[in-house]
Amino acid sequence: MSNKDIDIDQFDPRLAAAYARQEDKEQQYDDWAASYDADLVDDLDYVAWRDAGDIFAGLADDRSQRVLDVACGTGLAGEYLQSLGYQQLDGADFSREMLARAKERGVYQALWQHDFTTPKQLEQAYDALLCVGLFSFAVNGAAWRQLDMEPEVNRQARLHGFRIEQVVAADYIRKEGIDARVLVIRR
Ligand SMILES: C[S@@+](CC[C@H](N)C(=O)[O-])C[C@H]1O[C@@H](n2cnc3c(N)ncnc32)[C@H](O)[C@@H]1O
């Protein structure tokens, strides 16, 4: 089964448009940045950043560690992690407009632009990464089951030498009934 077999039109039109678009994703997020929080958090009860943040905090006790928020978007997860006591937060995203919103929150020490479909030579080491919503359609709860993602994720883990320690069910966009899987990955 592929994404094409999932009825995208069942979702709120803003989500349906986002999920349907395969080209110019960077531009799509640039265009969405100004209304992203209002659309997703206020209107649709997007909670993945909070649920993933809670799971992260339960595993990463040391609040002084350096954390990279991968695909940080407008910085929802970073702001939440800061409220939980993390102080050394960086964020990265390919959308400059999303990064501009993240900067306004004032919670990240550094923000850098990068497309994670290409390799990146890091300028500094991080102790932990948090990544929320980057695989937002293919790995949402329904798609996780329908697309049978788990065997492929485990294959990639074996290939690249990391371990999927836990797969935790979590809420994603509550108003749309979309759930999520949080993968706890260790090297
Ligand atoms: C659904 S949003 C999630 C943003 C944020 N983590 C949150 O929870 O609100 C997906 C984010 O991934 C970014 N993104 C998508 N594909 C990317 C890529 N290939 N490289 C870097 N960022 C990407 C988008 O710009 C967007 O900010």
Image (cartoon, helix red, strand yellow):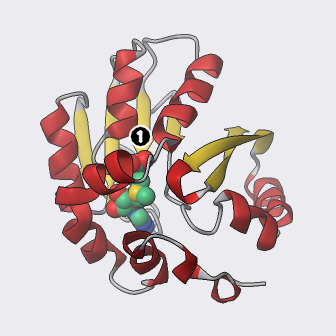
Which residue is pictured at 70% across the width and 40% down the height? 185
Front residue of 119 and 65 = 65
Q: Position of residue 179 (x, y in %)?
A: 65, 52
Give the residue at x 44% y 46%.
45
Q: How crowded is the residue under tag 1: few (<14 C-alpha within 10 Å), some, or many (20+)?
A: many
Residue 3's quadrant in the figure? bottom right
Residue 124 in view (yes/no):
no
What residue lies at 61% left-to-right and 57% top-to-bottom? 178
Residue 93, position as x, y percentages in the image: 33, 55
**Looking at the rendering, in which quadrant would you find the C terminus?**
top right
Query: Is the CB of the residue bearing disc 1 within 8 angstroms of ligand 1?
Result: yes
Secondary structure at badge 1 equals: strand
Read off the residue under disc 1.
69
Q: Quadrant location of the N terminus?
A: bottom right
In the picture shown, does residue 84 fall above or below 134?
above
| Picture layout, residue 22 above or below residue 173 | below
**Amino acid type for the residue under numbered disc 1:** Asp
